[in-house]
């Protein structure tokens, strides 16, 4: 099951100042060479004009590991009532 968070969901969990602090620290680790962030992997689905991308990262200092996955299907709103980007 996929959990979709809207803007207010995210804002209730993470303030903008905290998000900026965390991103600044993560990019500093990347610049210092203490983070791993391989190139994104993209898979295109030409039959429906969509694609999915995976973007993993690992911050060695805190042992934080995460992956961002995003899909883009232009037909989502009309066909499924979903946003174009999920």
Image (cartoon, rainbow, N blue to C red):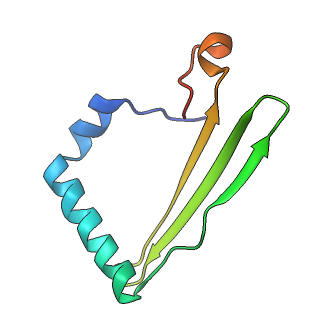
Query: Which residue appears at 63% of the width and 21% of the height?
Result: 76
Q: Is 8 situated left or right of 67 in this image?
A: left
User: Taking 44 as reference, is 2 above or below it?
Assistant: above
Q: Residue furthest right?
A: 47
Q: Is 58 situated left or right of 84 in this image?
A: left
Q: Position of residue 54 (x, y in %)?
A: 61, 56
Query: Which residue appears at 75% of the width and 31% of the height?
Result: 49
Q: Position of residue 4 (x, y in %)?
A: 47, 32
Q: Position of residue 21 (x, y in %)?
A: 19, 63
* Quadrant of res 11: top left
Q: Quadrant of the N terminus?
A: top right
Q: Quadrant of the C terminus?
A: top right
Q: Is 26 situated left or right of 19 in this image?
A: right
* Quadrant of res 28: bottom left
Q: Residue furthest bottom?
A: 33
User: Taking 39 as reference, is 36 above or below it?
Assistant: below
Q: How many marks?
A: 0
Query: Which residue appears at 55% of the width and 65% of the height?
Result: 56
Q: Position of residue 55 (x, y in %)?
A: 56, 60
């Amino acid at each position: 099951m996929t959990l979709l968070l809207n803007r207010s969901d995210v804002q209730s969990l993470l303030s903008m100042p905290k998000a900026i602090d965390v991103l600044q620290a993560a990019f500093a680790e990347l610049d210092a060479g203490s983070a791993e962030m391989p190139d994104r992997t993209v898979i295109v689905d030409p039959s429906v004009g969509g694609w999915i991308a995976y973007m993993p990262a690992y911050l060695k200092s805190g042992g934080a590991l995460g992956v961002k996955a995003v899909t883009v299907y232009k037909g989502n709103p009309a066909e499924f009532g979903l946003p174009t980007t999920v």
